[in-house]
Amino acid sequence: MSKVFYKAFAVSLIIFLTVNLIFAQDREIVTSDSAMVVSAHPLASEIGLDVLQKGGNAVDAAIAVQFALSVVYPRAGNIGGGGFMVVRTDTANYALDFREKAPVLATSDMFLDGNGNVRPLSSTHGHLASGVPGTVDGMIRAYERFGSLPWEDLIQPAIDLAINGFPLTEREAQKLNQNVDQILRINTVKPDFLKQNYYQTGDTIRFDELGLTLTRILNNKRDGFYEGETARLIMEEMKRGGGIINRIDLENYQSVWRDPYSFWYKNYKVITMPPPSSGGVALHQLFQIMERYPIGEWGFHDPLTVHLMIEAERRVFADRAAYLGDPDFVDVPAEILVDSVYLDGRMENFDTLKATPSGLIYAGEMPEESTETTHFSIVDKWGNAVAVTTTLNGNYGSKVVVGGAGFFLNNEMDDFSVKVGEKNMFGLVGGSANVIEPEKRMLSSMTPTILEKDSSLYMVLGSPGGPTIITTVFQTILNVIEFEMNMQQAVEAGRFHHQWKPDQVYMEIEAFDDELVEQLRSMGHKFKMRREIGSVDAILIRDDGKLEGGADPRGDDTAKGY
Ligand code: DON
């Protein structure tokens, strides 16, 4: 063979290796022509896909996936928690807030002892930690507005899984094993699904009582949860465990349609969640800051790019702590926070060579807890898109299972400022805009997001991860738009996170090479390793019209399409 051939071959090989080493990718890219679901569990993705293939729209599929996740992914998928849904149709965009609320009997000092100190674990474990669940009302609201298939078709698949049982994945068996003791300790009635003390991959688990609760929701919709037997069981659970959620809370709970929070980054329109999520405003601030710098030219994980992103994150999270809360209770100065003159001021002390210290008052620690929220992204054959992030907050929420009803309650009260200036379980410092008040929603970082490019649907994404949700969504978008990765590569790429306090960069192990870490250290950045940050489920609409899934290998996340 000729020298020219060898040379051409060598050059192609080098290009191939360079691209694949920089943007290493574990999983095959999943593509489809018409529609797609990407969720945290293969069985939930399968159910969503079935609904789409039967002619259901993206919201129908989202409802079915949400109920399915409450069974197959009970540590985060839920009916005892809450979340946010962003919907894009051809004609309009929508944001549904089904975030939990503080009970009417909640008070700003309910987690403090007589000396004004936070009672350890009181806002994270047990009955007092739960906000009033919003998921069931949220799904019904979404159905009333957009549902096209019969309601039964969206909930029966979850009931079948609960009653017939399903095999545990390795990850879910492990999670149960890690939590079984604590769940048993916290609950006064042994949860009916816990038949073993130790689970192995492939063991079948059944959720009979949850199946009955879901059947009541199938038959009576809202009244199947907020009234009648399920409400009675929740009341009994509260009585046994010293919780404060009462009948008025359940009767009064309403999810809310809000105007989505939208902004532009270059020629991309970002459609995401307004307060009580901090995600929309924070993303807007981050992208506004990025727009001033040629980060695409600097390159992915170039020291200057990473330094800038960290410094932007530091400033944005300081604002989050001070200004954001439930807009039904506090004025959120969103317009000022994203004003370009204001952001000029915020970046005035940005030094391209040095980290700006966060001026630590104390160092909050972010626990090594894994991601216990869940996000799913759906696109249907008409091009409608739905992004849902839903949560119990911590791993299996408050760990309380409603006796006889078979579902976990959230521990979302910890997302409030339990005490102003104190850190919560994510190390986030609480400000006064987010103090506990009856019927107020706790501030969230959940950021379900949809992007348009030149007015067409372009990307659907979101993640779990507490505060790291915001930086994870931010980095995944930049990976595609600025660093030209495909969706799967963008999802798999290593992540980092700075949240102002504590003053350290959380970095996934091996996200950066040693040289980059050393360069950033010499600029003054401090690092703390984390096993994983976030778990993104995303869909990209390519120029050729195909849908490309990004399913995070950090979990059992699965893309399915047709
Ligand atoms: O709403 C929030 O911001 C949190 N409750 C989300 C919690 C979460 O993502 C847990 N995963 N680590």
Image (cartoon, rainbow, N blue to C red):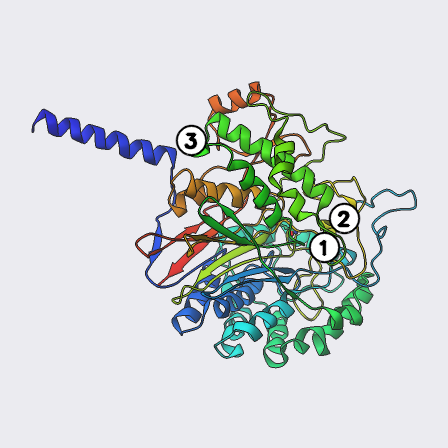
Is 168 on the left-hand or right-hand side of 29?
Answer: right
Tell me which amino acid carries mark 1.
Asp
Tell me which amino acid carries mark 3.
Gly
Dots 1 and 3: beta carbons under 8 Å?
no
Q: Which residue is mark 1?
A: 326
| Residue lying farthest to the front in this orientation | 341
| Mark 1 or 3, nearer chain start | 3
Q: CA distance from mark 1 to mark 3?
A: 37 Å
Q: Nearer the viewer, residue 155 or 466?
A: 466
The image's mark for residue 299 is: 3
Q: CA distance from mark 2 to mark 3?
A: 38 Å
| Mark 2 or 3, nearer chain start | 3
Position of residue 302 measured from the top left corner of the image (x, y, whole percent): 46, 28
Is the CB of mark 3 within 8 Å of ligand 1? no
The image's mark for residue 545 is: none
Res 381 → quadrant: bottom left
Q: Secondary structure at mark 3?
A: loop
Quadrant where the C terminus lies?
Answer: bottom left
* Mark 2 crowdedness (10 Å alpha carbons): few <14, some 14-19, many ≥20: many
| Mark 1 or 2, nearer chain start | 1
Tell me which amino acid carries mark 2.
Ala
Q: Nearer the viewer, residue 74 or 425?
A: 425
Q: Which residue is mark 2?
A: 433
